[in-house]
Image: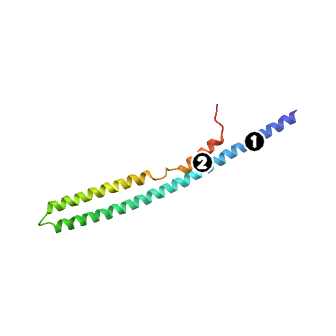
Amino acid sequence: MDAVAGSKSSSLLSAAGALIESLLGSAQNRIQVLSVELQEEKYRFIQTLILVGAVVFAGMMTIAFATLTVVYLFWENARVAALGGVTAFYAIGLLFVSLKLKHFLSTQPKPFSATLGELTKDRACFPPAN
């Protein structure tokens, strides 16, 4: 009888060990996926900041020189009208760019979606606790 109890306890221990090893392997996999996603998000964020900085600099220089050119051309005849026209043009451009930015941000994938998907699959494997 002791032999049967000993074999049952050893098989129970080995099953528990296999379960723990499986859970640890799954956790390690999820952490690795999260790490990769964090790295991708960091690179995308840095790339976005660099591009935004370049666009802002080039845009400001263009706006400044375009404004100076228009005001210089109309200095004698319609200085105020030229400034008003340039201001309206910039306001329309600001509205357009703002709407594009809002659309861009709303269409980006949610951060860590792959990790959340994997965790959802993991939860589906376990029966709900009652």
Which of 111 and 21 lies nearest the eye of the viewer?
Answer: 111
- In the structure shown, which secondary structural element does the residue marked by tag 1 occupy? helix
Q: Is residue 70 above or below residue 45?
A: below
CB under 8 Å between discs 1 and 2: no
How far, Cα to Cα, is label 1 from label 2?
24 Å
Q: Left or right: 84 with respect to 62?
A: left
Please name the residue that numbered disc 1 is placed on. Answer: 15
Residue at horizontal 18 percent and vertical 60 percent from the top: 83
Mark 1 / mark 2, whichever is N-terminal:
1
Residue type of the residue flagged with mark 2: Glu
Q: Left or right: 38 with respect to 19?
A: left
Residue at horizontal 63 percent and vertical 44 percent from the top: 122
Please name the residue that numbered disc 2 is placed on. Answer: 118
Residue type of the residue flagged with mark 1: Ala
Q: Is residue 27 above or below residue 68?
A: above
Which of 88 and 32 lies nearest the eye of the viewer?
Answer: 88
Percent coordinates x, y for residue 68 in the rendering: 21, 66
- In the structure shown, which secondary structural element does the residue marked by tag 2 occupy? helix
